[in-house]
C-alpha cells in the first residue's frame, strides 16, 4: 500500500483483506506457512481461488455426491475445474503440513512451550482424539474447511465495512477521532485488543458492517431429532427442518430502520435489545461459528490500523456499492460476477 502512495495507482483492497485473514488462520492451523499479504499477486490469486470455490457452493449442496469425488479424485483431474483446482491446492497444502508434523513427532511438553505450535500440532498430540480422527485424510478435510472459511468470510466483512466508511466522510472522521488517542504512537505502540473492544464507535461500525455483509446468508436448517418443538401456539413435529435467513433478519425494517443504509449510530442507542436479537452474522447456539472471537479481533485490528491517527488517507477508486455488496446466494453472500471489488488510491 505504501508503494502506491501518491502515485494514483489503485490498490485492490479486497484482495489484501482476503490475504490478511488467510495469513492469520494459516498461522493458527500450520507452522512456517509463508504469508501472502505483502505480495499483491499472491493476494489476488488466493482471493480468486476462494471466490471460485464459493461460487460453486450451491452445486455441492444440491449434488453432495460430488464432494465425495473431490476427496478421491487425483489433483491432476481436479485442477481441470476451477473450484476443483482450489480444493486440490488446499488439500495438497494441508497434506504437506500434516506429513511434516507427523515426521517431526514432537511431544506435548515441547508443543506447549513453543508459541508457534499450531492447531494441527495439538490435534496430533491430543490423547482424547481417536486415532481414526488423526488420519492424514481426516485432518486434511478439517484443515481445508478451517482455512477456507477463516480465510474468506472475515475478509468480506472488512471489505464491506471499509467501503461504507470511505463512502461516508462523517463516519470516517468520527472513527478517526475515536481512534486517535489509541493509535497516535503506531506502530511503536500497537493498541491492545481489549482497548479496541471498548471503543463504542469502532465496535458500532464493525457490527453495522457485519449486519450488511454477514458470512452465510442462506438458511442453515436444523432438526430436533427426539422431541416436538413448541413455539408459542405452534407444535413443530420432530425432524422438521427449522432455519432462519440471516439476510431477512439483518434487513428487517421494523428492527433496523432504513436497513440498506450504513448507520453505526443505531448501535449506540439506549435500547438495542431487538438489534442484538436479530444480529446473527455468526449464527448462534451449539452450531454457531467457532471463529467468532478471532473474526472480531481481525476486524478490530484491521479497521483500527487503516483508520488510525496517522494512517493512510484512502479514496475509493471507480468502486460502487454493487462492486462489494452481496447480491447472490452462494451460501455465502457474494457480489455479481462482474463486480470490480474494493479499489482505493492512497494519499
Image (tube, grey):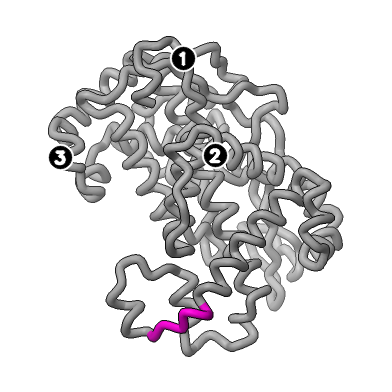
Q: Is residue 19 left or right of residue 266?
A: right
Instruction: State the mark number for residue 42.
Output: 2
Give the SS element for disc 1: loop
Q: Are discs 2 and 1 less than 8 Å apart at CB?
A: no
Pinpoint residue 110: horizontal percent, then vertical percent. 32, 81
- Quadrant (top left/top right/bottom left/bottom right) for the N terminus: top left
**How many numbered marks have been drawn onto this rendered protein structure?**
3
The picture places residue 218, in percent across and down from the top left corner, at 68, 45
Q: Is residue 49 magenta?
A: no
Q: Is residue 167 visible?
A: no
Q: Which residue is nearer to you in this view: 293 or 346? A: 346
Report the span colored magenta: 102-107
Q: Is residue 37 above or below residue 5?
A: below
Q: Nearer the viewer, residue 281 or 121?
A: 121
Q: Secondary structure at mark 2?
A: helix
C-alpha separation, residue under disc 3 versus residue under disc 2? 28 Å
Q: Nearer the viewer, mark 3 or mark 2?
A: 2
Q: Which residue is disc 3 drawn over?
A: 188
The residue under the point 43% across, 60% down is: 32
Instruction: Check disc 1 and report the residue beneath it.
Output: 9
For disc 1, the neighbor class at 10 Å (few under 14, some 14 to 19, many from 20) is some
Q: Position of residue 5 (x, y in %)?
A: 35, 17
Q: Earlier in the sequence, mark 3 or mark 2?
A: 2
Is residue 209 shown to the viewer in this render?
yes
- 337 sits left or right of 216 in the view: right
Q: Residues within 10 Å of mark 2 (few under 14, many from 20)?
A: some
Amino acid at each position: 500500500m505504501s508503494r502506491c502512495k501518491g502515485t494514483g495507482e489503485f490498490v485492490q483492497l479486497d484482495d489484501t483483506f482476503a490475504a490478511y485473514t488467510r495469513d492469520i488462520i494459516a498461522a493458527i492451523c500450520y507452522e512456517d506457512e509463508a504469508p501472502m499479504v505483502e505480495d499483491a499477486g499472491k493476494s489476488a490469486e488466493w482471493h480468486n481461488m476462494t471466490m471460485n470455490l464459493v461460487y460453486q457452493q450451491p452445486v455441492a449442496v444440491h449434488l453432495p455426491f460430488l464432494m465425495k469425488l473431490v476427496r478421491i479424485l487425483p489433483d491432476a483431474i481436479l485442477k481441470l475445474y476451477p473450484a476443483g483446482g482450489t480444493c486440490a491446492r488446499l488439500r495438497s497444502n494441508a497434506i504437506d503440513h500434516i506429513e511434516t508434523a507427523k515426521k517431526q513427532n514432537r511431544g506435548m511438553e515441547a508443543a506447549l512451550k513453543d508459541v508457534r505450535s499450531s492447531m494441527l500440532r495439538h490435534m496430533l498430540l491430543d490423547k482424547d482424539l481417536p486415532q481414526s480422527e488423526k488420519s492424514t485424510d481426516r485432518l486434511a478435510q478439517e484443515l481445508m474447511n478451517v482455512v477456507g472459511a477463516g480465510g474468506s468470510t472475515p475478509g468480506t466483512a472488512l471489505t464491506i465495512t471499509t467501503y461504507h466508511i470511505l463512502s461516508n466522510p462523517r463516519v470516517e472522521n468520527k472513527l478517526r477521532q475515536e481512534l486517535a488517542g489509541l493509535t497516535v504512537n503506531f506502530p511503536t505502540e500497537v493498541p491492545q485488543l481489549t482497548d479496541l473492544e471498548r471503543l463504542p464507535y469502532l465496535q458500532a461500525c464493525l457490527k453495522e458492517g457485519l449486519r450488511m455483509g454477514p458470512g452465510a446468508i442462506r438458511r442453515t436448517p436444523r432438526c430436533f431429532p427426539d422431541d416436538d418443538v413448541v413455539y408459542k401456539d405452534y407444535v413443530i413435529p420432530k425432524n422438521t427442518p427449522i432455519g432462519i435467513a440471516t439476510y431477512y433478519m439483518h434487513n428487517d425494517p421494523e428492527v433496523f430502520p432504513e436497513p440498506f443504509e450504513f448507520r453505526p449510530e443505531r448501535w449506540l442507542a439506549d435500547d438495542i435489545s431487538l438489534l442484538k436479537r436479530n444480529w446473527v452474522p455468526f449464527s448462534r447456539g451449539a452450531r454457531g461459528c467457532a471463529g467468532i472471537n478471532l473474526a472480531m479481533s481481525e476486524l478490530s485490528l484491521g479497521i483500527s490500523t487503516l483508520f488510525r491517527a496517522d494512517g493512510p488517507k484512502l479514496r475509493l477508486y471507480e468502486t460502487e456499492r454493487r462492486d462489494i455488496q452481496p447480491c447472490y446466494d452462494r451460501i455465502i453472500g457474494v457480489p455479481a460476477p462482474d463486480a470490480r471489488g474494493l479499489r482505493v488510491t492512497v494519499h
